[in-house]
Image (cartoon, rainbow, N blue to C red):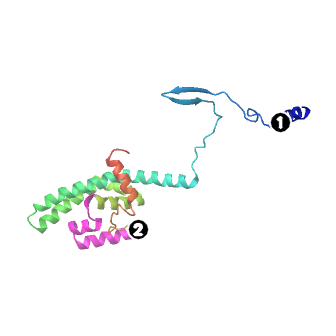
Amino acid sequence: MRLAFFFILFSLFIIPDPGKGQEQRIAIAKIIDSDTIIIASLPEYTVNSRLPRKLRVLAKRHNKLVYNVKKVYPYAKLAGIKLNEYEDILKNAKNDAERREIMKEAEQQLRDEFEDDIKKLTFTQGIILIKLVDRETGNSSYVLIQELRGKFMAFFWQTFARLFGYNLKTEYDPEGEDRDIEEIVVMIENGEI
């Protein structure tokens, strides 16, 4: 009997208590549409709003591109509209002399209206404008000058542009190099920015 008593007593110390070792907490919960949502207080967490350097640089570059495109896009849009107007007028010209006279008047009118604004554009804005003119008209600036003013004037303005780092033969590539510009233009057209 003594042996049985010691065995029972000994087994009480060896068998672990299922309630020991586990911390029990009482949580406040709310039931909403058969879902149980625990209501708890969380410790404070400080959010660092500073982006990593690489992302800051990319965001700054994108914001600058958005600014530049928004500044020159109206001029490119207007170039497409004016080109259509002048093509309609030139169709009614009787001969080359009248055609040249119409183009000289149109050029002077455009200079009077836009020369000061165009001169204030930055180098990057000028490059974007050349690309957007191609987008709006379907032809590079060089081809437009060649069709409207002749090969010599196209060569002259291309040479002049190359002196300052521009290329009038630059074409718009909406799926390649100019993909970011295309996205911005689409957002402008949709009224998103």
**Vertical placement of residue 3 versus 158, above or below:** above
Label 1 CA crowd tier, 10 Å (few <14, some 14–19, many 20+): few
Residue lying at the far right of the rendered structure:
2
Q: Nearer the viewer, residue 99 or 30?
A: 30
Q: Position of residue 28 (x, y in %)?
A: 61, 26
Q: Position of residue 24 (x, y in %)?
A: 70, 31
Q: Position of residue 187 (x, y in %)?
A: 36, 49
Q: Which residue is drawn at 32% across and 46% down?
A: 190
| Three-letter code, disc 2 | Gly
Q: Residue at x 29, y 62 (%)?
A: 134
Q: Tag 2 or tag 1, which sits nearer the N-term?
A: 1
Q: Looking at the rendered structure, which numbered label has been put on residue 58? A: none
The quadrant the N terminus occupies is top right
Q: Where is residue 82 in the image (x, y as percent from the top left)?
A: 22, 55
- Describe the element under mark 1 as helix, strand or loop: helix
Q: Mark 2 points at which residue?
A: 165
Q: Which of 49 and 171 is in front in this view?
A: 49
91 with respect to 171 (left or right): left
Res 109 → quadrant: bottom left
The quadrant the C terminus occupies is top left
Q: Residue at x 41, y 51 (%)?
A: 66
Tell us which disc is closer to us: 1 or 2.
1
- Describe the element under mark 2 as helix, strand or loop: loop
| Three-letter code, disc 1 | Ser
Q: Which residue is drawn at 46% across and 51% down?
A: 63
Res 65 → quadrant: bottom left
64 with respect to 103 (left or right): right
Q: What stretch is highlighted in magenta?
A: 136-165
Give the alpha-carbon distance from disc 1 to disc 2, as whole Å.
93 Å
Q: Name the residue under label 1.
A: 11
